[in-house]
Amino acid sequence: MIDRRLLLVHAHPDDESIGTGATMARYVAEGAHVTLVTCTLGEEGEIIPGELAHLAADRDDTLGRHRIGELAAACTALGVEDHRFLGAPGRWRDSGMMGAASNDRPDAFWQADLDEAAGELVKVIREVRPQVLVTYDDNGHYGHPDHIQAHRVSRRAAELAADSGFGEGEPWVIAKFYHTASARSVMRRTNEALAETGVGFIVESVDEMPFGSPDEAITTEIDARPWVGHKVEAMRAHATQITVKEPWFALSNNIGQEVLGVEHFILAGGVLGPSVPGPPMEAGGLGEPHDRENDLFAGIH
């Protein structure tokens, strides 16, 4: 069996737990080396607890430092011991939502020189030598500038890491490159279930949400249901950003979502592994046809 090494590149603290937390916990438990790179400190995040409102960017501007601690606690919950900030903590600042004035700050991640930022990620790739890299699609999953930039930086870094003429260290080729994904059929099913709970979160039309992939685009289902408790604990650690009412959660917009133990991905580079039966629909799976791989490392020898 290969020495499995997984690299995930996320934009802000909390992104890793929401989108890939169960997957990360599963692979750690199975003995894989899981490396998390976070690109910013999330300084522009909207704060949920009123008693911490003073941390905000327009007041004390200390939210980023606070979120370093939240992320450390989340990584502990997931079992992830290898976490780095791209370049260094605070090297690039959270850009805020698309169109915000904070996009234009010279230190914003959105303004980062692509090859400079990618060069920092190349250092991690050549050190860790992961077979698999996970990040967002070219729309950053939902259009956030830092998520889009994380995609661009990851793509460029994968190219540069394989180039023997770039930088220091031995070249390394990423075998499989994945985008995170939210399956629309799962979003609809969970919204219907949320509407029946009366838990108090807003139920928004899936068709109005700025993200979601058609089922036929999903290539990979990772069934990590035994580790969903670790994901819940990690999400609770991000208390400034997430309210958890298990099995539901919401960000500052109070729009409810389910804490999923089955997480979905789209293979964007590399060779797809064999198709296998997936988890049942009631557990968050996509159901028939079962033509998806169930392991990020499938087909790697």
Image (cartoon, rainbow, N blue to C red):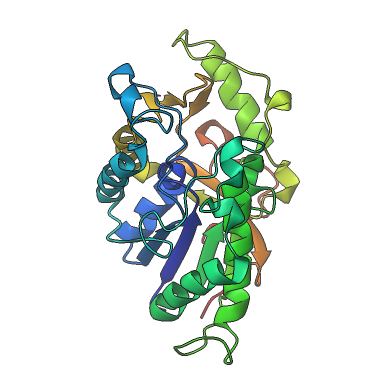
Q: Residue furthest top?
A: 198
Quadrant for the N terminus in the image: bottom left
* Residue 16 percent across, percent down from the top left: 44, 48
**On screen, residue 44 above or below 154:** above
283 w.r.t. 263: above or below: above
In-front residue for pair 31/148: 148
Left or right of 278: which side holds 63? left
- State the image quarter where residue 83 is shown: bottom left
Q: Is residue 97 above or below residue 203?
A: below
> Is residue 251 or residue 216 the one in the foreground?
251
The answer to which image quadrant residue 261 occupies is top left
The part of the image, by quadrant, that contains residue 77 is: top left
Asked whether residue 168 appears in the rendered view, the answer is yes
> Which of 73/228 is in front?
73
Residue 293 showing in the rendered view: no
At a point 56% along the width and 12% down the height, the residue shown is 195
Going 70% across and 42% down the picture, which residue do you hit?
A: 213
Task: Tell whether 123 sits left or right of 206.
Answer: left
The foreground one among 39 and 225 is: 39
Seen at 72% across and 24% down, the residue is 208
User: Residue 232, how many percent across, how many down?
Assistant: 34, 35
Residue 243's spot in the image, x, y percent? 38, 24
Number of numbered callouts drawn: 0
